[in-house]
Image: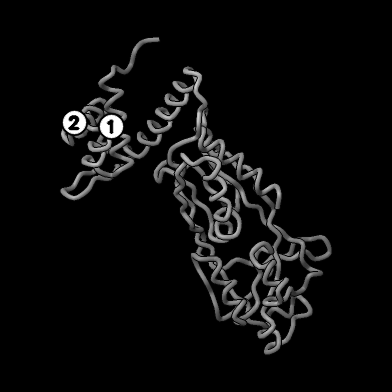
């Protein structure tokens, strides 16, 4: 195997990654106990070697270019593997460490994953977690995420999808709304009611409601004077306040149903569920922090 990197080039890669993580040549220099000029020279050396610009520089800040982000993600993973290999060779226990970036939709974040993160970090204190809570689809390469949780499998064959659970859907309304507007007895009755809508970010369209009728899945278009976008929990807040009827995930409202704040409707047409999937890039060498988080999440959610 021929030698592709000398000590100077490896050091330049380390300083580049440090500058990218801190978004500052000066802070990277302080952390590495070198001068800002040394960091700048290292980055320039890499840019000449690669024939690309890694950073967009202004007088106030630096930020990665698209090509720089791709290079940074690969270098960060490679350096992490080198550290793990060095520790293992020295007989040290390899510990998960570094920044873990994960994107997840609002309901799953608040009701499922965020309550588990304290326990995860108690087990792996050297792993730092950056959580992106949004229903918007992210780009793993361009935005530098390690993991995402979504409701549908990706079309990209370079991504792996593992099912976390099938989340049951339930139809609910507050007692105050039912007292005012009456209780629907059939699916057709929903056309006479205030049905709270959620706008799907990927399409800009309202989500149709799904029911199980005589063993068949039926999609029903509903309407109403309330519509929410971005924050899915908004529709549940409106329902709790008596604004109308909503179809949502049981795990969000199960306590409200038990405590009488919401009433389950048309249970004879229930039983429908939608999946939540853990998605991550297909990598030949998954970093240890990603691997332990995947195992942890699958383990914890299997108990639900």
Instruction: Report if residue 155 is visible in the image.
Output: no
Q: Position of residue 203 (x, y in %)?
A: 52, 61
Q: Position of residue 280 (x, y in %)?
A: 53, 41
Q: Residue furthest right?
A: 214
Image mark for residue 38: 2
Q: Position of residue 165 (x, y in %)?
A: 68, 50
Most foreground residue, 178 or 225: 178
**253 above or below 145?**
below
Report how far apart the C-alphas of labels 2 and 1 lie in the structure.
9 Å
Q: Are marks 2 and 1 in contact (CB under 8 Å)?
A: yes
User: Which color scheme does this rendered protein use?
Assistant: one colour
Q: Label 2: how many residues lie within 10 Å, few (<14), some (14-19) or many (20+)?
A: some
- Give the SS element for disc 2: helix
Write down the quadrant of residue 218 in the picture: bottom right
Write down the quadrant of residue 225 in the picture: bottom right
Residue 110 vs residue 80: left or right?
Answer: right
Image mark for residue 15: 1
Most foreground residue, 204 or 3: 3
Q: Label 1: how many residues lie within 10 Å, few (<14), some (14-19) or many (20+)?
A: many
Most foreground residue, 115 or 210: 115
How many numbered marks does the figure carry? 2
Residue located 84% across and 64% down the image:
214
Instruction: Report if residue 48 is visible in the image.
Output: yes
Q: Earlier in the sequence, mark 2 or mark 1?
A: 1
**294 above or below 227?**
above
Residue 222 vs residue 29: left or right?
Answer: right
**260 above or below 89?**
below
Quarter in which the N terminus is drawn:
top left
Residue located 62% across and 77% down the image:
240
Q: Position of residue 75 (x, y in %)?
A: 38, 31
Most foreground residue, 74 or 196: 74
Residue located 35% across and 34% down the image:
71
């Amino acid at each position: 195997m021929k030698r592709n990197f000398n000590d100077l080039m490896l050091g330049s890669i380390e300083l580049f990654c440090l500058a990218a993580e801190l978004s500052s040549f000066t802070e990277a220099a302080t952390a590495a106990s070198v001068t800002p000029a040394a960091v700048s020279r290292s980055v320039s050396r890499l840019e000449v070697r690669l024939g690309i610009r890694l950073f967009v520089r202004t007088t106030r800040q630096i930020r990665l270019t698209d090509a720089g982000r791709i290079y940074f993600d690969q270098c960060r993973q490679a350096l992490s593997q080198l550290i793990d290999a060095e520790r293992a060779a020295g007989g040290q226990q390899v510990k998960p460490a570094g920044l873990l970036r994960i994107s997840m939709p609002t309901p799953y974040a608040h009701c499922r994953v965020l309550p588990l993160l304290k326990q995860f970090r108690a087990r792996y204190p050297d792993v730092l977690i950056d959580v992106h809570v949004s229903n918007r689809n992210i780009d793993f390469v361009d935005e530098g995420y390690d993991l995402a949780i979504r409701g549908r499998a990706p079309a990209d064959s370079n991504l792996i999808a593992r099912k976390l659970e099938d989340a049951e859907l339930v139809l609910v309304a507050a007692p105050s709304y039912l007292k005012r507007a009456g209780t629907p007895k059939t699916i057709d009755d929903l056309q006479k009611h205030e049905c709270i809508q959620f706008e799907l970010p990927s399409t800009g369209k309202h989500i149709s409601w799904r029911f199980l009728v005589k063993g068949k899945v039926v999609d029903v278009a509903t309407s109403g004077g309330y519509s929410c976008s971005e924050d899915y929990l908004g529709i549940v807040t409106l329902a709790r306040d008596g604004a109308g009827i909503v179809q949502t995930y049981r795990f969000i409202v199960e306590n409200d149903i038990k405590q009488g704040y919401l009433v389950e409707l048309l249970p004879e047409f229930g039983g429908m569920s939608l999946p939540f999937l853990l998605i991550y890039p297909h990598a030949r060498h998954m970093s240890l922090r990603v691997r332990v988080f995947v195992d942890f999440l699958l383990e914890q959610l299997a108990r639900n």
